[in-house]
Image: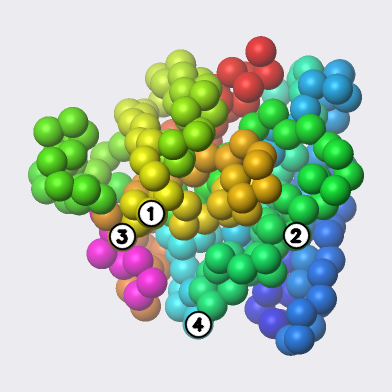
Amino acid sequence: MENLRRAASWIEERFSQTGLEVTSQSFRMSEGIYRNVIALQRGRDPEAGLVIVGAHYDAYGELPGADDNASGVAVLIELARTLPPVQPRRSRVFAAFANEEPPIFPSGEMGSAHYARHLKESGERVHLMVALDLVGYFSDEPGSQLMPLPGLGWLYPTTGDFIAVVGDMGSGRWIRMVKRGMLGSRAMPVFSFRAPSWVPGIDFSDHKPFRDAGLPGVLVTDTAFLRTPHYHRRSDTIETLDFRRMAGVVKALHGALREADR
């Protein structure tokens, strides 16, 4: 609990330095009070719907959690920090979520589940939601990228040097939107994958509660256990992160934000 409180305060401070409107959403569990930290860039058109980019700031158990998911939080903060000084059409939300990891996943006590319910109950329109989860591990070694299903190696690269946009079978239009914007930035290779939610990894993040609520939601990821050998291990340390390519993810996400604002 104490580490989560410190992390939330640190994220809140970083968000405050961006000049965006910063708030938090608190919720109580038996262990105490948890909170999502939210930064808002108001758009010109309140009726156009929100564009949400989120990342969870908890780690699995007592593991270091550099890729899972300090990498996602770092990219989230940098994305908010480097926004161009132009008001977008659609309001943008940058959300740091508590409680994504097991044993809370995939329950309704996830921070993202609390936030998705709040949006649904308030009648807030969501144009797009992007979850950032494990976006810092890359490899140039042939064979470093595994596949979730047999035969996909004929369609996708087997070298883990790209970022992926992932979603369920109903997420095609949002996957295409995000991929189109990210590719348009020319920052890095981007591939997409759409499959039923029973395929391992398809809904293993903060986009799941949004999809469960009937809202848009996709995942941007380095593909987690299909690539990194450090997933949910003590070896998931900062030394394994590729900061140059993480900067490319930030640049690519700026392209996705522009595309979502059309």
Q: Earlier in the sequence, mark 3 or mark 4?
A: 4
The image shows residue 156, relative to residue 75, as above or below, that is: above
Amino acid type at image mark 1: Trp
Over which residues does the magenta segment extend? Answer: 227-233
Closer to the eye: label 2 or 3: 2
The image shows residue 66, relative to residue 186, as above or below, that is: below
Amino acid type at image mark 4: Glu
Q: Which residue is mark 1?
A: 198
**Label 1: element kind:** loop
Q: Which residue is mark 3?
A: 225
- Categorize mark 3 by other alpha carbons within 10 Å: few (<14), some (14-19), many (20+): some
Label 1 close to label 3 by CB (< 8 Å) = no
Q: Is residue 137 visible?
A: no
Q: Could you tell me what secondary structure mostly forms the magenta stretch? A: loop
Q: Position of residue 124 (x, y in %)?
A: 83, 37
Residue at x 74%, y 86% (from the top left corner): 31
